[in-house]
Image (tube, helix red, strand yellow):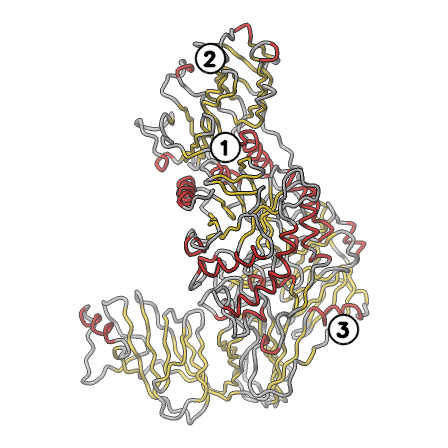
């Protein structure tokens, strides 16, 4: 094991010294390579000690057995730069990383092949992981930290196995994580290996795995009083595993991060302090905000470094927190949670003697520092200012333990020390300022007013034996100092005081918070003219001849981009189509008419036409576009499963829509007799002479929850059909002829039945929890379409079209007809003229368009202008691109998302990311 990095009970040791580390997420696959060093320096400049680095498997294995570790993919060069800048690194190579990245970084050809059980103790999956680890682990092993004096550097101090496994239904988490750790060790990894719990379940995240230490992600409410208690809870949980509290992810606000440090966390990793964006097709889908959500290419949660590499205002508080950590050093890194945390703490406005955090809205963290003294962390989450004192003495008896008044405005926080031994018999007994520098050998310390409560503050110092009033020297009128019962009371807002004589004297400096953040941006400007091209990207025929049934795109070797399915058929008279298991974004064209784009979620989708198809048609064309594979595993929609496929599995032309809301026989669920008996006991008794006949889902009762079966006979003449429930809020289990077909839910209101033999019995188990509306039910009757071919289109085809396109000048607005696309070129001179700090912000005014952006080197991602039915956009901004310095013209492929066409009205350059 590593001699340089170790867990020693509840301490993190580096070079044998205990440390508390602040760690910022910085992902090189989301930052242009030319700007890697600037982002690393930005992290260093705010005082952070380390970065956390996801390494996505499918970013490096770009196609099956095709690997890329060059250029933007050169992770080893990024780690070398990290060493050059002077930061440590936690690396997280998966195999699963989440990170709102396509498939959580598990390649789609692994997750969807039907042979592997991803994130399980499964030989097939572990065999695939071994290929990935065989590529990445030697790099990680070479870049491990090898001591401060090592000539060849190395920055990796921790390695994480998988990610947030407790969110996933892993059958044997200990064995799975243990197998990953064993592989890591076999490639030479000797630093500590951790497994993080995403929702606090350390055991289910792999806590039983041998040679693996549990860590935890904490995402509390920033304004909850309970944050401190939550941290202490997991600090004690880490103690039971005999490891330090490593918080791999948490909130970004430094007022909250103080609370983690002030309650015993040794490693604090606020997630996404350095923002960026997803190049190419790196985006994912998930369940953020609603089911389902498309993640924007812009990956920015408001961290302290924005996507262009500029500091946000909270950077000054980052520097302050890191200064406190560094000033206390090993005292903090070996601190323990105070047993008497609230003893002697008083709020002037509070009633009674007991300090009640919940009642007054002021949270308290207290650590007993190694070597003596306490670090007290106060957070005022109330709506009123709080005057806090520590000690039981009256205001004029400071030497008996009274504390200089610490006034915290509403929403403010502070970290102060009390009873801190300084050596040579001196002690910093109390202060309402924050300790930001301490040099015991040089006999200097610096106190500063809290960043959130600037102004006059004080300190009480117990001097060394023999110090008299004549030994106190004030070097500014902004400070006062006097002795009270042997203690020295210093008050003011800035300046320096010297206590003592000669080499044994101490220099005490008072300062105010410094503001280093400079907000700047390029001035706003508008693009007046562009160039456009009508060149359309080509489509590549997928392997195979004419198919009978449509296949998912992954089954045809297509893992990103779009798939275009075509079947020869006459759609005349069709009312619409049902697409079977369609994802992600789809639209349908019949002859000269088509439908708007919509998100489908991998379920059966009923897409009615605005009006029946009036003319004969040669074929039907269904275009499906992959936004990304899910980075979560959610059973609410097929597309949200980690193994969920894209494209479609078939289509049905709908010729009749039959309202079947009436004529249902209602009864108990015969497959669950225990439930039927419970319902009878609760008063839901059904007669059978005759069996009640009613509307679908209409049975009134006082027994909740309940499940009843609604049954009717179908006479469709052997036609094919789908079931559709509009506005339903229940879970419906559908059976035809006694055979279970599937489930209808509010998220998946349509279900493919296929061919329905005449006289089939349709039974639906309606599960109602509290009186939900069962919805309006209809049968969609038609014909299954066969004889499909499929073509694909991805970045390769788009880049080839971009390269060959010829342009003509045009003025805005640009109109893109339904079903078509246009190349729009924004001149590089305009981009350069609005550049600030090596990047140009480009925003758009328009609707009904999807824009895919290219520069000389990069595909910058995709933006959808206007809503996209069936989804929302989450994770960042959906209205901008960031164009890196030196990238020439900006090339936009604009596709209409609406049948009536889309419009790009304006292109705005410059300004701030945070407008």
- Say if 300 sits above or below 813 in the image: above
Residue 355 occupies quadrant: top left
Task: Tell me what residue is drawn at x 42 percent, y 51 percent.
Answer: 200
Residue that numbered label 1 is attached to: 332
Q: Position of residue 872 (x, y in %)?
A: 53, 62
Taking the image as shown, residue 525 lies to the left or right of residue 731, namely right
Residue that numbered label 2 is attached to: 487
Residue that numbered label 3 is attached to: 535
Taking the image as shown, residue 439 lies to the left or right of residue 667, namely right
**Inter-mark Cα distance, 2 to 1:** 25 Å
Q: Nearer the viewer, residue 792 or 577?
A: 792
The answer to whether residue 671 shows anywhere in this view is yes
SS at mark 1 in the image: helix
Q: Nearer the viewer, residue 883 or 128?
A: 128
SS at mark 2 in the image: strand
The answer to whether residue 915 shows anywhere in this view is no
């Amino acid at each position: 094991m590593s001699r340089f990095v170790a867990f020693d009970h509840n301490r993190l040791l580096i070079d044998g010294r205990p440390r508390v580390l602040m760690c910022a997420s910085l992902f090189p696959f989301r930052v242009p390579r030319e700007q890697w060093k600037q982002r690393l320096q930005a992290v260093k400049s705010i005082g952070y000690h380390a970065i956390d680095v996801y390494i996505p498997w499918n970013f490096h294995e770009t196609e099956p057995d095709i690997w890329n570790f060059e250029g933007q993919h050169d992770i080893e060069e990024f780690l070398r730069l990290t060493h050059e800048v002077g930061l440590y690194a936690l690396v997280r190579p998966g195999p699963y990383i989440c990170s709102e990245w396509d498939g959580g970084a598990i390649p789609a050809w692994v997750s969807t092949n039907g042979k592997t059980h991803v994130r399980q103790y499964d030989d097939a999956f572990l065999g695939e992981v071994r290929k990935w680890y065989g590529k990445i682990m030697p790099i990680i092993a070479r870049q491990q930290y090898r001591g401060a004096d090592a000539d060849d550097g190395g920055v990796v101090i921790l390695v994480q196995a998988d990610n947030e496994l407790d969110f996933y239904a892993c059958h044997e988490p200990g064995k799975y994580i243990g197998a990953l750790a064993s592989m890591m060790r076999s490639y030479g990894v000797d630093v500590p290996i951790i497994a993080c719990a995403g929702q606090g379940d350390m055991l289910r995240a792999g806590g039983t795995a041998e040679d693996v230490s549990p860590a935890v992600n904490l995402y509390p409410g920033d304004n909850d009083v309970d944050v401190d208690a939550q941290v202490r809870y997991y600090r004690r949980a880490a103690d039971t595993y005999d490891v330090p509290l490593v918080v791999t992810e948490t909130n970004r606000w430094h007022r909250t991060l103080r609370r983690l440090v002030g309650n015993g966390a040794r490693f604090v990793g606020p997630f996404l302090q350095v923002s960026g964006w997803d190049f190419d097709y790196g985006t994912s889908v998930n369940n953020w905000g609603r089911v389902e959500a498309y993640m924007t290419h812009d990956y920015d949660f408001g961290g302290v470094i924005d996507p262009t590499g500029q500091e946000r205002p909270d950077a000054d508080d980052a520097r302050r927190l890191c200064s406190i950590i560094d000033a206390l050093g090993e005292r903090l890194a070996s601190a323990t949670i105070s047993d008497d945390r609230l003893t002697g703490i008083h709020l002037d406005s509070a009633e009674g003697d007991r300090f009640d955090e919940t009642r007054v809205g002021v949270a308290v963290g207290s650590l007993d520092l190694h070597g003596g003294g306490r670090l007290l962390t106060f957070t005022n989450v109330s709506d009123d200012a709080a005057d806090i004192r520590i000690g039981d003495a009256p205001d004029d008896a400071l030497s008996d333990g009274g504390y200089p008044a610490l006034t915290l405005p509403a929403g403010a926080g502070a970290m102060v020390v009390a009873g801190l031994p300084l050596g040579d018999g001196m002690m910093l007994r109390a202060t309402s300022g924050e300790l930001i520098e301490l040099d015991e050998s040089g006999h200097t310390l610096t106190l500063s007013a809290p960043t959130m409560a600037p102004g006059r503050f004080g300190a009480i110092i117990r001097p060394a034996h023999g110090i008299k009033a004549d030994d106190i020297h004030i070097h500014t009128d902004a400070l006062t100092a006097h002795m009270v019962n042997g203690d020295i009371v210093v008050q003011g807002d800035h300046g320096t005081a010297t206590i003592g004589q000669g080499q044994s004297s101490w220099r005490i400096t008072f300062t105010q918070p410094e503001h280093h953040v400079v907000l700047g941006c390029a001035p706003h400007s508008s693009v007046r003219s562009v160039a456009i091209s009508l060149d359309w990207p080509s489509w590549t025929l997928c392997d195979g001849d004419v198919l009978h049934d449509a296949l998912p795109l992954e089954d045809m070797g297509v893992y990103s981009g779009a798939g275009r399915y075509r079947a020869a058929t006459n759609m005349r008279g069709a009312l619409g189509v049902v697409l079977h298991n369609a994802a992600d974004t789809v639209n349908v064209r019949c002859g000269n008419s088509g439908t708007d784009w919509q998100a489908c979620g991998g379920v059966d989708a009923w897409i009615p036409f605005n009006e029946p198809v009036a003319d004969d048609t040669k074929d039907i064309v269904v275009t499906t576009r992959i936004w990304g594979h899910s980075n979560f595993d959610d059973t609410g929609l097929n597309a949200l499963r980690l193994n969920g496929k894209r494209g479609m599995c078939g289509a049905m032309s709908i010729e009749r829509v039959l309202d079947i809301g009436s004529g249902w026989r209602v009864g108990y669920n015969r497959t669950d007799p225990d439930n039927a008996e419970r319902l009878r006991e609760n008063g839901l008794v059904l007669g059978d002479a005759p069996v009640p006949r009613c509307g679908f889902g209409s049975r009134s009762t006082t027994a909740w929850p309940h499940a009843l079966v609604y049954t009717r006979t179908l006479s469709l003449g052997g036609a094919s059909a789908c079931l559709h429930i509009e506005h339903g809020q229940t879970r419906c289990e559908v059976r035809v002829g006694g055979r279970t077909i599937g489930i209808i839910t509010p998220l998946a209101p349509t279900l493919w039945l296929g061919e329905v033999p005449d006289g089939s019995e349709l039974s639906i188990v309606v599960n109602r929890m509290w009186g939900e509306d069962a919805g309006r039910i209809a049968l969609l009757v038609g014909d299954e379409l066969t004889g499909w071919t499929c073509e694909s289109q991805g970045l390769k085809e788009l880049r080839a079209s971009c390269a060959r396109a010829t342009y003509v000048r045009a003025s805005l607005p640009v109109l893109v007809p339904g079903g078509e696309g246009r190349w729009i070129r924004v001149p590089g001179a305009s981009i350069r003229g609005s550049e600030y700090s090596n990047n140009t912000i480009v925003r758009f005014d328009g609707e009904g368009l999807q824009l895919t952006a290219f520069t000389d080197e990069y595909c910058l991602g995709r933006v959808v202008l206007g809503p996209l039915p069936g989804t929302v956009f989450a994770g960042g901004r959906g209205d901008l691109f960031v164009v890196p310095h030196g990238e020439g013209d900006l090339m936009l492929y604009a596709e209409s998302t609406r049948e009536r066409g889309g419009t790009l009205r304006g292109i705005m350059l410059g300004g701030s990311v945070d407008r």
